[in-house]
Image: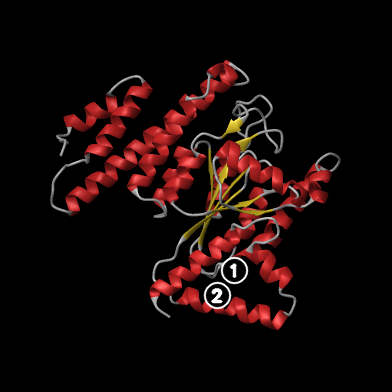
Amino acid sequence: MSRASLRGSVVLKCSVDAAGGGRDLRHTIYTVISEQVRREVLLQHFVDQAAGLTSLPVHILSDIDMTVWVGTFGAGGPKFPTGPVPGALPLFHALGNRVTFLSARPPMWEGQTRRLLVDDIGIAEAVVLPGSLKAVAQVLFAPEQARQAMAERKTEVFGQFATLHPEARFVFIGDSGEGDIDFAEEFMAVADGPVRAALIHDVVRSDGVVPKSSNQRRADLHLRGIHVFDTYAGAALELFRQGLLDMEGLRLTTHGCLEEFAEINPDEFASLEVFETRRMELLRDVREVNTALRTAGSTESTASGQGHHVSKATLQFLKHIAMWVGGFCELWRLQAKGHTMP
């Protein structure tokens, strides 16, 4: 089979996946097709096709509540006002791939979930892998068991979904509120197949200020391949370091994160302290992004024999960041080192 045909097959699977309402590929393979032999033949066909691909696509696997959207569902303190988490959508766009939402929400809420994705978040086509009503009900009287049940449910449905896309390099983005870390540990424990990445958006405690995950907890998870982040600028930087996001994607995500944060009225936060904490977290991560962009730009320029030359887009981005911080320090440093506009 030609490479074009192989790529076309991947696109076709993604199109079927986005059908929703019990018509997606997972439902077709694992429910409509009742004969196990026929199912196994089809799954093996997917594996054989994946072996013929020279470039493996990145597939985003994301939770919804407290990961990309703050609403009434999900656990954690008042980190952001109700609405989208700043930077999530810009990162999805920068990765340039379809998104599969692995949610704790039960199947009966799928219609409501899809309306949320379309009307409030702006994602029209996505796969929604639902949770279970039992796990949601347990939150009220047995939260620890509910967390474990949510993780087990996500592991189960993703296990089926992964067999449909053996060619995918999965990037999981969840939060530290309800079972996503447990799932991420199972997700990253898979030894075979394409390289994976797991990122956890850290929720906060009831005061809205203190992160749920301690520095030691973050370090322990990092050793297991799970990166805990506070802002989507920080998440983009981690994916950049892992080679899953290029310089332009890092720049666009950080820019989008800044713009979306700036659109939130400070009065909408639970308190001025909560707003200031979020602002400082973002500025810290933006400074790290700036450093990474300068280093990567300098390395690329040296390798190409062009000396210290930074692109116009990168300089404009750094200027925007510097203005947002309240000065032109980063831009001045570039100019002092002899970086010139192209």
Coordinates of residue 93 in the picture (x, y in percent) = 45, 46
**What is the three-letter code of the residue carrying label 1?**
Leu
Coordinates of residue 280 in the picture (x, y in percent) = 47, 25
**What is the three-letter code of the residue carrying label 2?**
Phe
Q: Secondary structure at mark 1?
A: helix
Please tell me whether residue 178 is drawn above or below residue 332 in the rendered image: below
Q: Judge whether residue 178 can be spotted in this image.
A: no
**Label 2 Cα crowd, 10 Å radius (few <14 / some 14-19 / many 20+):** many
- Disc tally is 2
Q: Residue at the location (39% across, 78% down)? A: 2
In this rendered view, identify the residue nearer to me: 16 or 226. 16
Coordinates of residue 300 in the picture (x, y in percent) = 23, 50
The residue beneath circle 1 is 164
The quarter holding residue 212 reads top right
Viewed as shown, does residue 108 lie left or right of 252?
Answer: right
Coordinates of residue 166 in the picture (x, y in percent) = 54, 69
Real-space CA distance between mark 2 and mark 1, rounded to the nearest whole angstrom: 7 Å
Please tell me whether residue 121 is drawn above or below residue 275 in the rendered image: below
The residue beneath circle 2 is 46
Q: Secondary structure at mark 2?
A: helix
Q: Earlier in the sequence, mark 2 or mark 1?
A: 2
Q: Which quadrant would the N terminus be assigned to in this image?
A: bottom left
Q: Which numbered marker is on residue 328?
A: none
Q: Judge whether residue 11 can be spotted in this image.
A: yes
Q: Residue at the location (27% across, 40% down)? A: 294
In this rendered view, identify the residue nearer to me: 227 or 232. 232
Viewed as shown, does residue 134 lie left or right of 337?
Answer: right
**Is the C-beta separation of discs 2 and 1 under 8 Å?**
yes
